């Protein structure tokens, strides 16, 4: 399993609006892509901005490529991100992911 993590920041006054976008339209394509196992949105407000992360789990790199294309490490943005995000980070992070459970 591979976990893909995207990060973005907004101003505080745009944070609630952007959260609603991410929870609905902004993550719809993830959920509709074959090989996507889960989608989570993380949010952290600070004094001067709000951070967002989309944390998605995938069956493998080929599933991520179905979503992001061959250059799967490149961040993917939507028209609704324009004028809301404070910057456009070029890359996302990918991690090999393992599940752990108690024995027995």
Image (cartoon, rainbow, N blue to C red):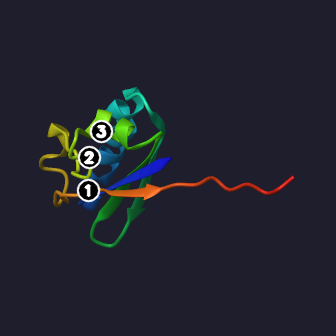
Q: Are marks 1 and 3 in contact (CB under 8 Å)?
A: no
Count neighbours of disc 3 (C-alpha within 10 A) and say few if under 14, some if 14 to 19, many if 20 or more. some
For label 2, the SS is: loop
Q: State the residue position of label 3.
A: 65
Residue drawn 19% across the image and 45% down it:
81
Residue furthest to the right in view is 104
Q: CA distance from mark 2 to mark 3?
A: 6 Å
Given this view, does label 1 or label 3 mark the residue nearer the observer?
3
Q: State the residue position of label 2.
A: 72
2 or 1: tag closer to the N-terminus: 1
For label 1, the SS is: helix
Q: CA distance from mark 2 to mark 1?
A: 31 Å
Count neighbours of disc 1 (C-alpha within 10 A) and say few if under 14, some if 14 to 19, many if 20 or more. few
Q: Are marks 2 and 1 in contact (CB under 8 Å)?
A: no
Judged left or right of residue 38, residue 7 is left
For label 3, the SS is: helix
Judged left or right of residue 24, residue 70 is left
Position above or below: 64 against 11? above
Residue drawn 30% across the image and 38% down it:
65
Question: In the image, which disc is placed on residue 21?
Answer: none
Q: CA distance from mark 1 to mark 3?
A: 34 Å
2 or 3: tag closer to the N-terminus: 3
Residue furthest to the bottom in view is 47
Question: In the image, which disc is placed on residue 13?
Answer: 1
Q: Are marks 2 and 3 in contact (CB under 8 Å)?
A: yes
Q: Position of residue 67 (x, y in %)?
A: 30, 35
């Amino acid at each position: 399993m591979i976990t893909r993590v995207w990060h973005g920041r907004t101003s505080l006054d745009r944070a609630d609006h952007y959260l609603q976008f991410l929870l609905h339209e902004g993550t719809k394509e993830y959920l509709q892509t074959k090989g996507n196992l889960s989608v989570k949105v993380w949010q952290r407000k600070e004094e001067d901005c709000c951070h967002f992360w989309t944390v998605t789990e995938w069956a493998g790199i080929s599933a991520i490529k179905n979503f992001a294309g061959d250059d799967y490490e490149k961040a993917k943005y939507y028209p609704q991100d324009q004028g809301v995000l404070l910057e456009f980070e070029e890359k996302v992070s990918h991690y090999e992911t393992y599940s752990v459970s108690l024995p027995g």
